[in-house]
Image (spheres, rainbow, N blue to C red):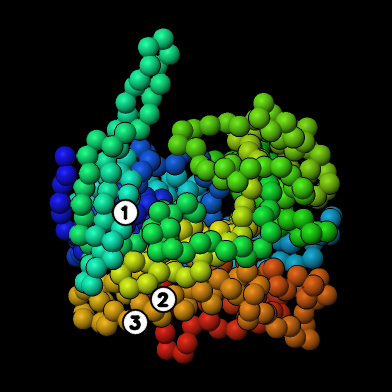
Amino acid sequence: MILKEHTDVLVVGAGPVGLFTALLLSRRGLAVQIIDEEWRPGAHSYALALHPHSLKLLEAAGLTSALLEIGRPISAVNFYTGAERVARLDYRQLSTGYPFILTVPQNTLEELLERQLKAAGRHVHWEHRLAQLRLQEDSVFATVDQLGKETTGYAVHLTEWVTEATRWIDASFVVGADGHRSAVRRALGMDLAAAGNPRFYALFEFQCPTEVSEAAMVLDEGRRSVLWPLPGGRVRWSFEIQDADIPAESRLKSRLPLHVGSQIYPYLAREDLHQLLAERAPWFEAEVGQITWSLGVRFDQRLARGFGAGRVWLAGDAAHLADPLGVQSLNQGLAEGADLARRIGGVLQDHVPLETLGEYQEHRMRLWRQLFGQEDMPATDGGTSPWVASHAVELPSAIAASGEELTALLEQLHLHLPAVMPAGSVSGAV
């Protein structure tokens, strides 16, 4: 069976970036379809912190109040080397309505976004896989397979995905927010080029009866670690592991609640957590309660050759992969979705020239090169401490902030980041 239809925008990928982009486009009055080849949202995820700028963007989508009721606000981040605290960031000094980081599990954010989409009359088409894109002069022709499960075998039953129907969608624009294996990016012929060496982390999430109110990062001997206080009396520690042998497939998110323990990754046992804490964070004296989640994961650092062309554009992990410390990939992805929604709306509703979308690519490429330390390096001044100066290149991506707030926080450390946006431009406006 073949179904033919038209939409203003086809969004491929129903993670937080895709859902947010679809919601903003819908709120502009545009016809939107959103598809995902999975059968439900992710259950566990690595991204868990929203930047102040992201909270401002989510406020425009009517989500911030609900997030504040669920999440955990963090107003300070401490930096350590061994047992010594070497720097501190105070988010309360920021000139914003949200002077803090908010820790919220990514799956919770996804659930809220999908709920808002349903309220706006839009539904995610789960189990729909993009099969082909064909660029036309005034639109993009997408072939989408509707998937279903088929059980085969006699003595042993096997279940496999099969195509139950095919949908032909003629879209004015396509936004690829379909993750690091993006079918949209592949259709554009763009690969994810290495922007740094892969990093391997051992992640532990556990109950913590002791109150932990501030985040912490350890940058020591080329190894990174980060502590995040979470809602519900939990904390998450992520420790960079040198020379770990974790396959790239470990980055895939589980679609069901899952505890991965010592059976698969033996070094993620409870005693290894205590050993890592003793080695990396001797100052951490809080009690370790029940370990609720542990995982070994590889984080690649990659950047696409471009963010799109014409009527097909990328956002989120489809265009970049980053180290998890500053939660940049998620938060920059939300800003990218907001930017695209504004620019696409301008083309379709306000007769803005299509060519202006090239500014989106130019800005995003420069911003990510800056975060990856490839250009626009932070400058020091007379007040910069030796420790901060020695980590100047890596600090912009490690700090959980973006836009003007990132610039202001770096200035607390006497680092000065060149502005990415041209004068008079508005980044991520909705």
Q: First in sequence, mark 3 or 1: give its number.
A: 1
Q: Do the numbered discs 2 and 1 sit on residues whose CB atoms are within 8 Å?
A: no
Q: Quadrant of residue 375?
A: bottom right
Label 3 sits on a secondary structure element that is helix
* Residue 343, x across and y down, in percent: 32, 75
Circle 3 residue: 356
Q: Nearer the viewer, mark 2 or mark 1?
A: 1
Label of residue 258 in the image: none
Count the numbered circles shown: 3
* Residue 316, x across and y down, in percent: 46, 60
Circle 1 residue: 132
- Horizontally, is 366 left or right of 430 in the view? right
Tell me: residue 44, above or below residue 28.
above
Pick the front one: 231 or 301: 301
The quadrant of the rendering that contains the N terminus is: top left
The quadrant of the rendering that contains the C terminus is: bottom left
Residue that lies at the very extreme toward the top in this rendered image: 155
- Which residue is found at the position 50% from the left and 37% from the top? 254
- Which residue is found at the position 46% from the left and 33% from the top? 256
Label of residue 360 in the image: 2
